[in-house]
Amino acid sequence: MAKSTGKVRAARLTDLSALGELSRLAQGAAEGTRSLGLPVSGPPIGAFTLFRLPLGAFTPHDVMYVFDRNGSIAGLLRVERETIRDEWTVVELDAIGDGDAGDVRFRLLQNLQRDGAKRGAARFHVACADADDNVELFMQAGFVRYGDECVLRRTPGTPLPPPMDEEMAHACGIRECTPADALALSKLYAAITPRPIQRLEAFRLHDWERQGRDWRVPRSSLAPILRFADVIAFVQDAPGGGRDGNSIDALVQVGVAKEDQPHYLKVMARPDVDISALLRYALGVIGARGDAATTHRQGVLAPVRTYESPVDRRLEEEGFVSIASVTLLMKETLVRVAEPRLVPAGVR
């Protein structure tokens, strides 16, 4: 890996044109470029796409760095900050240069971690394709690989099912999610998620109370899409309320695109539950709430983690096909300590 000459600095308004072109080249996999390789097509969700979106697409908490090589931009790193939990998500890491693209990206990543440590970042997240040395780059920087997701897509030409009426939805136990469902959702998550991943993601009860555009639980590789979508979550109650009277069998998070982006589904369900009605309901919501100009333009994307099977097969039954696999990595900046145990008062 060649050593690159240049410096990392914060992006400026005067960089927008150059950043747009760099992002377009990298997301289009031009020769000599490298990116995270997330499978979003026509057009990719890159900086060059974001710059033509409303300014509300960016928040004051977002971070963008560039690699300046003698006045020309050779690298870009864009981060979304979740201020509720001080978590930073890398959503774009691009570089151009036949011999030193790898070094440019590594230096951008080093700068991110130094800056994040100063600003109190608790965790760094990233999702990337296992290509162009992406995984090796982040592991070299101290990230831990903790999961893989299969990304499924329902093509734009596939007709969406008609919206389900309220009476039919009620018969299937489907209703809109509310903050009062937080405990039941936490139990659902714990029932299907391996304990090591639960410890890493460390969701708390009040995290499940927030369902919307500004907070994305459960996390996925394509969560940045939700910034440009109307987000609604629906649950499927267990028949009769289950053992404790308020159990939930499945959750679907629906992101209805407001811009020229794909719609989004994220499903979390117990493996022995039939979720076909819930999926049709969610697709019907997209058809009913989507803008006429964008409803069928980009299709629907649905990320599914490997341990969440058979959700992927249920999606395939509804017209989804697998288009890619991505890797999830995370780095914690906080040190975990064991909680002290209580001992009898007379013990020294």
Image: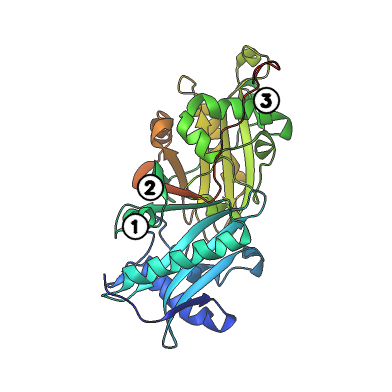
Q: Nearer the viewer, residue 346 or 8?
A: 346
Q: Is residue 57 left or right of residue 90?
A: right
Residue 322, above or below 310: below
In this orientation, which residue lies closer to the viewer: 130 or 139? 139
Q: Give the number of the mark in front: 1 or 3.
A: 1
Disc 1 designates what residue?
A: 134
Left or right: residue 181 versus residue 18 is: right
Residue type highlighted by circle 3: Glu
Q: Residue sitting at 62 percent across and 11 percent down?
A: 243
Marks 3 and 2 close (CB-CB < 8 Å): no
Element type where label 3 sits in the image? helix
In this rendering, the answer to whether 91 lies above or below 281 is: below
Going by the numbered disc 2, the residue's amino acid type is Thr
- Identify the disc placed on residue 209: none
In depth, the one of 289 and 331 nearer the eye is 331
Crowd tier of the residue under label 2, counting other residues whose Cα lies within 10 Å: few below 14, some 14–19, many 20 or above: many
Which residue corresponds to mark 3? 167
Mark 1 is on which residue type? Asn
Quadrant containing the C terminus in the rendered view? top right
**Pointer 2: what residue?**
327
Q: Which element is circle 1 on?
A: helix
Q: Are marks 1 and 3 in contact (CB under 8 Å)?
A: no
Measured Cα–Cα span from mark 3 to mark 2: 40 Å
Whether the residues at callouts 2 and 1 have beta carbons within 8 Å, the answer is: yes
Q: CA distance from mark 2 to mark 1?
A: 9 Å
Tell me which residue sits at (46%, 47%) in the image: 301
Mark with earlier residue (2, 1): 1
